[in-house]
Image: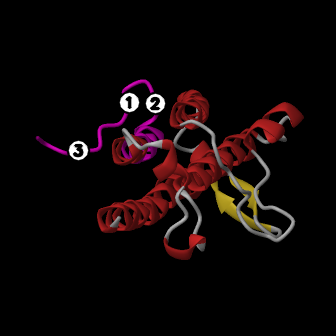
């Protein structure tokens, strides 16, 4: 198998390459979580002190959704905010997620990736240098934002892989 980043020929070269990173990491993520049981999806690690895979999937979808709307220069609708959010709970932690089926989480995240793809068709390589507001009054270029989506996914994939390892170990002891 040959691994490569091939941009979509209908997107600008840089936008296509950046979206290829997002899409490749999303495909990697879905392969990592394929076949997870509900018990494993909700597992929070030893002593229940970590974020579950379900929490991380919902978090990734919500963050990516916010980037889509940030890039578009629009606010996330109340309907989507209720479906995907909030970012943090009252304790400034990822909100609790339990009992949501893997296919529901993936279907919701698929929708966000589809929105990102549609947006990338509209972006020009020059437009990727446009700045958008990002966290606490800072700014980021759209180019950096799309890269960040891919990077953020890989970051949490490491957590999910660790959770899978712990889950397997805890079930082999039983």
Tell me the element at label 3.
loop
- The answer to whether residue 24 is magenta is yes
Q: Give the side of residue 103 with respect to residue 174, left or right.
A: right
Question: x%, y% of residue 32?
Answer: 35, 48
* Residue denoted by label 1: 8
As rendered, which of 51 and 23 lies closer to the eye? 51
Q: Are marks 1 and 3 in contact (CB under 8 Å)?
A: no
Q: Are marks 1 and 2 in contact (CB under 8 Å)?
A: yes
Say if 85 sits above or below 164 in the image. Answer: above
Question: x%, y% of residue 162?
Answer: 39, 67
Return the mark for residue 112: none
Res 95 quadrant in image: bottom right
From the image, state whether disc 1 or disc 3 is nearer to you: 3
* Residue denoted by label 3: 4
Q: CA distance from mark 1 to mark 2?
A: 5 Å
Disc 1: CA contacts within 10 A as few (<14), some (14-19) or many (>=20) = some
Residue closest to the far top: 10
* Residue denoted by label 2: 11
Q: Which residues are the magenta region?
A: 1-25
From the image, state whether disc 3 or disc 2 is nearer to you: 3
């Amino acid at each position: 198998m040959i691994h490569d980043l091939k941009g979509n020929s209908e997107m600008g070269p840089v936008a296509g390459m950046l979206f290829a990173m997002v899409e490749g990491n999303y495909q990697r993520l879905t392969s990592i979580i394929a076949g997870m049981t509900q018990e494993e999806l909700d597992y929070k690690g030893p002593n229940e002190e970590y974020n579950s895979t379900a929490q991380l999937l919902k978090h990734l979808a919500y963050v990516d959704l916010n980037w889509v709307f940030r890039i578009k220069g629009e606010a996330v609708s109340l309907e989507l905010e209720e479906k995907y959010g909030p970012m943090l709970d009252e304790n400034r932690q990822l909100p609790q997620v339990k009992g949501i089926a893997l296919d529901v989480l993936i279907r919701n995240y698929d929708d966000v990736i589809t929105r990102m793809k549609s947006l990338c068709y509209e972006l020009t390589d020059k437009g990727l240098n446009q700045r958008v507001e990002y966290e606490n009054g800072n700014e980021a270029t759209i180019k950096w934002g799309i890269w960040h989506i891919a990077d953020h996914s890989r970051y949490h994939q490491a957590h999910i892989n660790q959770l899978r390892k712990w889950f397997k170990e805890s079930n082999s002891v039983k």
